[in-house]
Image (cartoon, rainbow, N blue to C red):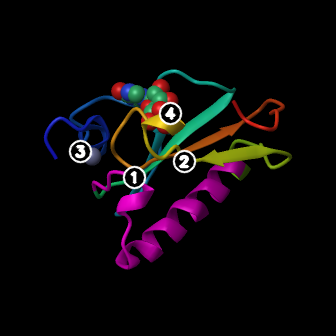
Amino acid sequence: MGGCIFCEIAKKKLDSRIVHEDSDVIAFEDLNPQAPVHILIVPRKHIVDLLHLSSTDQTLVGKIHLVAKELAKKRRVERGFRMICNCGEEAGQSVGHLHFHLLGGRRFKWPPG
Ligand code: 5GP
Ligand code: ZN
C-alpha cells in the first residue's frame, strides 16, 4: 500500500523499534509515547480500520490481543494497562492502517479524553 507508514515499517523500509514480530503481526514503540509503555500492535496486512475488518480477519484480531497480553507481561504492566484502537478521525485516528495502542506504566483516567 503506497504511502502507508505502517506498511513501510512492517516491510522494514522505515525504521522503528520493533518489540515483536511474526508472520501476521508486528509491534513497535510509538514515536510519541503517551505513557512509559506505549507500543503499537499492527497487522502486517493493510486494513484501514476496524470498520474494514472482515470475518476472515477473526484469527488475526485474536492474535493481536494475544501479542498484547505477552507484551503486557514482558513489560510488567499487568497491574493496569490499556488496549486502544482509535477508529476514524473523530476518535483521533491519524494513521489509516489498523493499529492497537498498548499503554501502561502509569495511572489512567476514565472517561478518556
Ligand atoms: P492514531 O492517532 O492513528 O490512533 O495513532 C497513530 C500513532 O502512530 C500515534 O501515537 C503516533 O505517535 C504514531 N506514529 C506516527 N508515525 C509514526 C512513525 O513513523 N513511527 C512510529 N513508531 N510511530 C508513529
Ligand atoms: Zn498500511
The quadrant in which residue 108 appears is top right
Reading the image, the residue beneath label 4 is 92
Residue 108: say if magenta.
no
Q: Position of residue 86 (x, y in %)?
A: 52, 43
**Disc 2 element:** loop
Q: Amino acid at mark 4?
A: Gly
**Disc 4 element:** loop
**Residue 49: assigned label:** 1
**Residue 85: assigned label:** 2
Give the magenta part as a residue range.
46-72
Q: Amino acid at mark 3?
A: Lys
**Disc 1 element:** loop
Sequence-first tag of 3 and 1 = 3
- The residue at label 4 has a CB less than 8 Å from ligand 1: yes
Q: Are marks 3 and 2 in contact (CB under 8 Å)?
A: no
Q: Give the quadrant of ligand 1.
A: top left
**Residue 11: assigned label:** 3
Q: Amino acid at mark 2?
A: Cys
Callout 4 environment at 10 Å: few (<14), some (14 to 19), or many (20+)?
A: few
How far is disc 3 from disc 4 in space, using C-alphas? 25 Å
Q: Are marks 3 and 1 in contact (CB under 8 Å)?
A: no
Q: Are marks 1 and 4 in contact (CB under 8 Å)?
A: no
Q: Are marks 2 and 1 in contact (CB under 8 Å)?
A: no
